[in-house]
Amino acid sequence: MSDDASDADFLGRLRPRATYALGTWAYLRLLGLVHLIAFVDFGLQLPGLIGGRGLLPVKERLAAYAEGDLGFWELPTLAWWGASNTELHLLWIVGAACALALMLGWLPRLMVALCFLFYLSLQKAGGPFMAYQWDLLLLEASVVAIALAPWRREPLKTRTGEGPRDPHRLVWAAHAFLFGRLMFASGVVKLASGDPDWASLGAMDLHYWTQPLPNPLSPLVHSLPHWVHATSVITVFVIELGFPLLLLVRGWPRRVGAIGLLALQVLIALTGNFGFFNLLSAAMALPLLDDEWLRTWRFIGERPGRAERRPARAPTLLLAAATLALGAVPLFGTLFGYQSLPQPVLEATHAIGRFGPGTGYGLFADMTDDRIEWIYEGTTDGRTWEPYALPYQPGDLDRHPGQAAPRMPRLDWSLWFAALGSPSHQKVARELQGALQRAEPSVLDLLAHDPFDGETPRAVQVRRFRYRFADDPDERDVTAATIRGETWRRTPVSRP
């Protein structure tokens, strides 16, 4: 062997190209867990939300599409071939079974594809109840994961010492780009919105009590001094805008970027209820942590030698390249404005986007500075009004926020958006009043408390209240509220 060849071989061993087999192995199993949570959680709420006697029956939506000569390509869901309660339950049950198989590593690529198909069907059938950014993120992440996953099961370690194989660079890049633009776009929209709460570093003074569903730690974190909240705003901008750029640099910068973005998701999860979003986003950071670092810290396991590269055929590479190209469109639109893009590109992205890829992300662009709650009350005698209670709505003043995540109480979320003026969610609010008036069992099952135990009330009314945490320094009688053990204070506002 020549001296030049020996030197090249030595340098190759000294500075080997990073591999990402272990993190990818763990991510695919966590993706199965996220799908399992999403399927089961929505499936249990399905009858009262979109079932035959639910708030927004999917059969009515399908009929409206059919009247407009629209079909599967405009609303891609298997519910076109059956939308009874039994058939809708079948969708989530089969999807959950596929998610469990993915967690166990059985036929990973096929299971990811089936999870995507069944979740896409439920997401499109779910209307406003399934229109949240993490529902779309789960779909797009699953499309990329179809290319990322192997066809056969890859154990973490076999008897011969072999383990999972390293994904193809282009496929890995498609996943890294999706995760990076999710985080980067969330920072960009905050700056581009012109919201004075972000500009003045006061957004986090509002966030913990105005977010859709505070969790048990939200009141405690809200009570921290303003300088802590201002520092949090700066930290959010640094992580969301700066750390995704670190993912472009091999070595320790990429590790810092991935760990920082993962840590942000942990902090968000500790102070709010955002369904499975934080679990999914944190899991997406794992394939960006190289095998050498993971083996050093023994986070997943040891594996001697270097991970063998998994071969990728043309369809796999084409899928990865397509997701990269489609993802570039919303990122470009977020940075420079969608009006600067050619109309054919926008139309093509919109058409394909119905199936998941090419979604535009950006969380909390405008900080909510108020909290209005719709409180439903019923009466049997026309004089005494008793309140209904949702699982995680503030309701009673002494009701401390609960922990919902990684589950997603979609009726609670819908009423929060209804109070902000969303037309589709205000329709849900109106339908809810009618369902309570009829004492519809499937809808009552979505509640935490029915004061009439399933009996039909004489009338149902809706009242609106402005809520704030009881220990908020801007509120009066804070000491008295604290003595009474109240978590919330509220004042009535005009009826909707």
Image: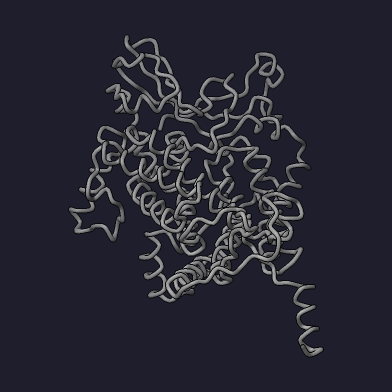
Where is 330 relative to 396, above or below? below
Residue drawn at the location 65% of the way across and 16% of the way down: 485
Where is 184 relative to 492, above or below? below
The quadrant the C terminus occupies is: top left
- Residue 13 rendering spot, x and y as whole percentages: 76, 73
Q: Please state which of residues 27 and 304 is positioned toward the viewer in this rendering.
A: 304
Q: Please state which of residues 260 and 373 is positioned toward the viewer in this rendering.
A: 260
Viewed as shown, does residue 353 lie left or right of 213? left
Where is 342 relative to 81, above or below? below
Residue drawn at the location 42% of the way across and 21% of the way down: 388
- Residue 195 rendering spot, x and y as whole percentages: 61, 52
Q: Please state which of residues 467 and 76 is positioned toward the viewer in this rendering.
A: 76
> Residue 483 lies in what quarter of the image?
top right
Where is 482 relative to 274, above or below? above
Viewed as shown, does residue 255 lie left or right of 142? right
Residue drawn at the location 45% of the way across and 29% of the way down: 374
- Residue 469 rendering spot, x and y as whole percentages: 63, 28
Q: Is residue 187 visible?
A: no
- Residue 448 rendering spot, x and y as whole percentages: 45, 23
Q: Residue furthest front?
A: 159
